[in-house]
């Protein structure tokens, strides 16, 4: 009976269709006829990407796994017997994971199969490429990405083939982000899908451009809080303002704000409490914008009309 079982297994293997080796493609071999399964169970392996999977010769007349191209064998699993597969990436590649009946092994390079049933296993590999990230220019800043990546000068990230990478540039106070070079362009986030070695450059320049500001006519009531309105903008996107409230040449109040976001399309304001005894005479207020680099705008003055 044993001789007949082994002969049937050997005949089944001889009838198996073996696929030829192919770089970075899945290699899959097909199961033989079920006649040999009384003593052995099928182990079918497929490989995706640049690597191979090996397993020892499980029994007499049964071939070892060396996939690709030898991706099938019959292994005896009776009485607690096990069968171990080993994943080996090609040079410049990494093993990324097991799937199917080896899924529990995850990133471990070996997977041990057990249990009296047929086994289907997939192993995946991928090349790893260097992404060189550099900052340049007369200014300073930081480049940030996922998983806590942060770079100020020149850094190298090791990225698996086909993995998406997103980088963002953040200028320091007194600097502006001037744009990407290399594999990215523009001033928005740098999004890449690596298919080979790559590099990007983030250029930061020293901020030498003064903000702009325009005071807008404002109204209020004596003895109440009045809103002194203005528009401001800066290449850095941030500025603070210094405001003087004037009656003729007399300075009635000085108001300063902290650094805050500014945009030319948005109306900003500062609050001033109008003294209840102030004479209802023509007033004006003048605004100066200052950016984080210390660049100052010319003063812009607007009218302030008060009612009793």
Image: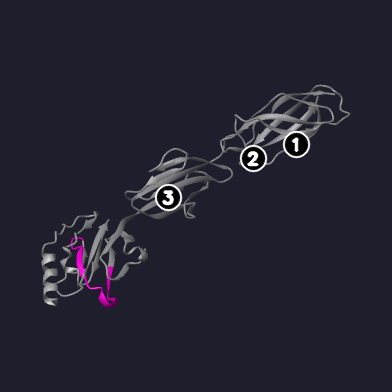
Q: Which mark is residue 114?
A: none
- Measured from the top left, where is residue 95 in percent x and y? 32, 61
- Image position of 258 (left or right of 191): right
Q: Marks 1/2: CA distance?
A: 15 Å
- Image position of 30 (left or right of 251): left
- Measured from the top left, where is residue 165 in percent x and y? 41, 49
Q: Please name the residue shown 65% across and 41% down the image.
A: 259
Q: Earlier in the sequence, mark 1 or mark 3?
A: 3
Q: Is residue 72 visible?
A: yes
From the image, which quarter does the N terminus lie in? bottom left
Magenta segment? 68-85
- Residue found at the very far front of the displayed protein: 1
Q: Is residue 298 visible?
A: no
Q: Marks 1/3: CA distance?
A: 43 Å
- Measured from the top left, where is residue 175 in percent x and y? 55, 42
Residue count near mark 2 (Cα–Cα under 10 Å), binned few <14, some 14–19, many ≥20: few
Mark 3: which secondary structure? Answer: strand
Task: Check disc 1 and report the residue beneath it.
Answer: 255
Q: Which mark is residue 133?
A: 3
Callout count: 3
Q: Please name the residue shown 43% across and 45% down the image.
A: 201
Residue 303 among those drawn in magenta:
no
Task: Check disc 2 and report the residue beneath it.
Answer: 260
- Measured from the top left, where is residue 118 in percent x and y? 25, 65
Q: Earlier in the sequence, mark 3 or mark 2?
A: 3
Quarter residue 173 falls in: top right
Residue 80 among those drawn in magenta:
yes
Q: Please name the residue shown 32% across and 48% down the image.
A: 195
Q: Earlier in the sequence, mark 1 or mark 2?
A: 1
From the viewer's perspective, is residue 280 above or below residue 234?
above
């Amino acid at each position: 009976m044993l001789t007949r079982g082994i002969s049937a297994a050997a005949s089944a293997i001889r009838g198996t269709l073996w696929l030829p080796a192919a770089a970075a493609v899945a290699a899959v071999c097909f199961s033989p006829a079920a006649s040999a399964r009384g003593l052995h169970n099928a182990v079918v392996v497929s490989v995706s990407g640049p690597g191979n999977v090996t397993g020892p010769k499980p029994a007499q007349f049964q071939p070892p796994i060396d996939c690709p191209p030898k991706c099938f064998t019959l292994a005896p699993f009776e009485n607690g017997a096990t069968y171990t597969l080993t994943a080996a990436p090609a040079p410049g590649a990494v093993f990324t994971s097991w799937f199917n009946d080896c899924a529990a092994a995850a990133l471990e390079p070996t997977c041990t199969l057990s249990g009296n049933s047929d086994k289907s296993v997939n192993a995946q590999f991928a090349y790893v490429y260097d992404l060189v990230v550099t900052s340049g220019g007369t200014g300073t800043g930081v480049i940030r990405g996922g998983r806590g990546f942060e770079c100020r000068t020149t850094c190298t990230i090791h990225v698996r083939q086909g993995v998406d990478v997103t980088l963002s540039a953040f200028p320091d106070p007194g600097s502006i982000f001037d744009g990407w070079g290399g594999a990215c362009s523009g001033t928005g986030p740098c999004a890449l899908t690596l298919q080979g070695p790559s590099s990007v450059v983030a250029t930061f320049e020293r901020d030498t451009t003064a903000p702009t500001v325009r005071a807008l006519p404002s109204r209020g009531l004596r003895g109440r809080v009045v809103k002194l309105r203005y528009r401001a903008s800066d290449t850095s996107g941030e500025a603070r303002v210094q405001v003087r409230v004037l009656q003729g040449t007399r300075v009635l109040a000085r108001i300063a704000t902290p650094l805050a976001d500014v945009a030319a399309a948005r109306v900003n304001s500062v609050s001033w409490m109008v003294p209840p005894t102030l004479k209802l005479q023509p007033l004006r207020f003048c605004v100066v914008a200052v950016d984080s680099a210390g660049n100052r705008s010319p003063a812009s003055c607007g009218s302030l009309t008060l009612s009793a």
